Amino acid sequence: PMWDKHSRSMRDVIMPGVGLYRTQAARSNALAGISEPEFGPVVEFALDGAKFSAPEWCRVVVKRMLANGAIGEFAAIEYWIENYATAGKDSMQPNTMWKKRPRGQIAKCAQAQALRMAFPEMVGAAPTADEMDASRWTPARLMLHQQSSLNNQSNSPSARTKNSLRTNRHGAA
């Protein structure tokens, strides 16, 4: 169930999961593989006075057979702090599943994003239920993410990509 702000009540909502995305991609006969998840460094997050450790990011690559016979690679990087589900609307702490298996949860989000990138005609832009739980962004949570990103900027693949793009576009980093 999800909170419906219009009716001010909980209601059942059917949402896709990463399993549906995998099934749709496999049925297309164009799925050429899915990489094992690659995880970033384990970092510590202080959320509502409690400390939690989780991989900073996860990267998954989906391979798709293209119309010309080539294999296209679609890589997605997802950050734990941007995806984790909170224990409640007034809490910044992760819910039980994100506390218990932070690597598995962020891997599902990264795989879902990579599958959406590789197969947009099948899965569209519909987020999975796991990703929707993370939609409760608050100013404090956003600030925490920005601080975490600054502290770990040089270690993340996106920072390396941004730096290389900056170098390629402007001649020097």
Image (cartoon, grey):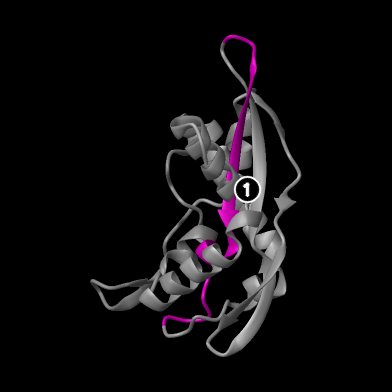
Most distant residue in the front direction: 172
Most distant residue in the top direction: 68
| Residue type marked 1 | Pro
Q: Which residue is drawn at 45% across and 31% down?
A: 169
Q: Is residue 139 left or right of residue 61?
A: left
Front residue (pair 47, 156): 156
| Residue 147 place in picture, x, y as percent | 50, 70
Q: Residue at x 66, y 55 (%)?
A: 155
| Residue 104 place in picture, x, y as percent | 70, 60
Q: Is residue 88 left or right of residue 64?
A: left
| Residue 36 place in picture, x, y as percent | 76, 44
Q: Vertical placement of 51 versus 17: above or below?
A: below
State which region is magenta. 68-89
Q: In this view, does 145 lie to the left or right of 114?
A: left
Residue identifier under label 1: 157
Can residue 21 be seen in the rendering of this structure? no
Q: Residue at x 57, y 39 (%)?
A: 115
Front residue (pair 146, 35): 146
Q: Is residue 132 magenta?
A: no
Q: Vertical placement of 138 versus 36: above or below?
A: below
Q: Which residue is drawn at 54% across and 43% down?
A: 163
Front residue (pair 15, 52): 52
Element assignment for label 1: helix
Label 1 crowding class (10 Å Cα cut-off): few <14, some 14-19, many 20+? Answer: some
Q: Does the magenta stretch include residue 79?
A: yes
Most distant residue in the left direction: 6
Position of the N terminus, as image quadrant, is bottom left
| Residue 87 place in picture, x, y as percent | 53, 80
Can residue 141 be seen in the rendering of this structure? yes
